[in-house]
Image (cartoon, helix red, strand yellow):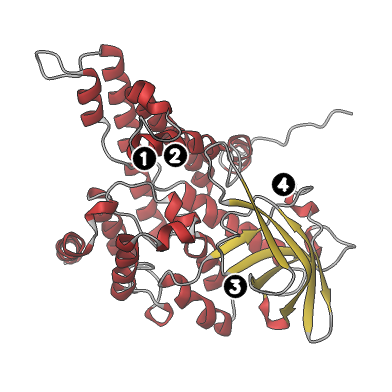
Amino acid sequence: MQSNALSTFRSEARTWLEANFTPSLAFKNPVPYQNDAAFAEADADWRLWRDRMAKQRWGAPGWPAIYGGAALEGGDVRILDEEMARIGAFNPMKMTGYTMLGPTLMEYGTDAQKARHLPGIATGQVRWCQGFSEPGAGSDLASLQTRCRDAGDHWVVDGQKVWTSGANHADWCFALVRTDAAAKQRGISFLLFDMRSPGVETRPITLISGSTHFCEMFLNAVKVPKDNIVGRVNEGWGIAKRLLQFERDSLSQGRGEGASLLPLAQARIGVDEAGRIAEPDVRARLIRHNMRAQAYNLTIARIGMEAKSGISTDSMIPVLKNLGSDIAQERADLMRELLGEQGVGWSSPGYSEEEIAATRHWLHSRAFSIYGGSYEIQNNIAAKRTLALPEPQQPR
C-alpha cells in the first residue's frame, strides 16, 4: 500500500510540476536567486515560481501546515526532490532561513518564535542571514567577541561580523553573541534580530567571481527585544552546533545535479562514427564524472531513507559535504574546458549570457570547499566522529 501511495504522489507531483514550473529557470544556477533579493525579484518567472510553490506549500514540504508547510512524509519529500531535479527545477525557498534556521527553531524555538518566523520562511517572503564568523573568530568560532548586554527590558548588541552571506538583502539575522565575557562556549547566546534595526550596517565584499553576496556587518548599539533569544541565555553554543549540522547537511545535498554536459561536449568536440564524443580523454572524464554524480545522488537518497527510519546519519555529513563540493567543482572545470576560450569570458561583447554565467560559476565553485566548514575541517570532523581517530598531539 505504501508503494502505491508513493507512486500516486510521484504522478501527482510530476503533473503539477510540469504544469507550474517556469521553463526559463530550468537547470539555472540557484545561487544568485538565493543570495541576491534584487536579482531574484527582478525575474518575473522566479517570482511566479516562488508564489506557486508557496501556494502549494511545497517550499517547505515537510514542515507542519501550521507553519506554512505541506506536512509531507519523508518518502514524499524525497520524491518531490527527485521530480524537481528531473526537470531542472529548484526550490525557491531553499535559502538560509529554510536550510538552517527553520529546523533549528523547530527544535529550540518557543511556540511564539516558531509562529512568528517560520511561515515567512516557508513562503519565501522573509530572507535571513547568518551572523556567526567575525574577523578574529572563524575556525575558532567560540572566540567571538560581539557583545550582547542586558539593558533591562531589551538587549544591546555591539560588534562586527564578516562573511555574512546575503546580509545586504536579508530581512532578519540569527547570530551568535557573547552574553558572558568570563566564559568561552558557555558565554554565548543565540539571538534573532531585525536587520532594519537602527545601528545595523552592511558592507558587501566583492569576490573573484564578481559576486557581492558576502558582507561585513557592523552592529552599533543595536536594541533587540528580550524574547529574541533562542533557548536559554549563555546556552547558544549547543544550538549553534546543531544548526551547523543542518547547514552541512544542506550543503551535502544537490551537488551532483545539473544539466548534462553531453550535448555541450558533442557540439564543441564532435562525435566519431559510433556516435561517441570524439576525444577519448574527454569522453572518459565525462563518464567518470557522471558515474560519481549518480553514485553521490543515490547515496544521498539512501542516507535520507535511513534518517527517516531513525538511523543516525550525522557522521556522514562531513564526508558528503566534501564529496559534493568536489563533484560540483569537477563539473564546473569540465564545462569551462568544453567551452574553450568562450569559457573564460567576463563581459560582453563576444560572450553570451550563458558563457559569462559559466565563467562566474566556475570561479564561485572554488568556494564550495571552503564555506560551510572548509575541506580540512570536514576531514577533521570525519576523522573524529566516523573513524574515531585520536586527537592530534600538540607539540610541546
Q: CA distance from mark 1 to mark 3?
A: 32 Å
Amino acid identity at mark 4: Gly
* Residue pointed to by mark 4: 138
The residue closer to the viewer here, 393 or 200, is 200
- The answer to whether the residue labelled 1 contacts the one labelled 3, judged by CB atoms less than 8 Å apart, is no
Q: Are marks 4 and 2 in contact (CB under 8 Å)?
A: no
- Residue 276 at what x, y percent from top left? 16, 19
| Residue 145 percent coordinates (x, y) | 82, 58
User: What's the CA distance linking mark 4 and mark 3?
Assistant: 24 Å
Q: Earlier in the sequence, mark 4 or mark 2?
A: 4
Q: Going from the N terminus, do you reach mark 1 or mark 4 first?
A: 4
For the C terminus, give its image quadrant: top right
For the residues labelled 1 and 2, say whether their Cβ atoms are less than 8 Å apart: yes
Instruction: Kindly identify which numbered label has been placed on residue 108.
Output: 3
Which type of secondary structure does the marked residue at label 1 adopt?
loop
* Viewer-nearest residue: 224 or 255: 224
The amino acid at mark 2 is Gly
Q: Look at the picture and state if 389 lies above or below 58.
A: above
Bin the neighbour count of mark 4 within 10 Å (Cα to Cα): few under 14, some 14-19, many 20 and up: some
- Image: 17 above or below 333: below
Q: Is residue 313 visible?
A: no
The outermost residue toward the front is 349
The image quadrant that residue 128 belongs to is: bottom right
Q: Residue at x 27, y 55 (%)?
A: 84
What residue is shown with label 1? 256
Look at label 1 and name its amino acid. Gly
Please report the residue visible at 27 percent of the width from the left and 50 percent of the height from the top.
26
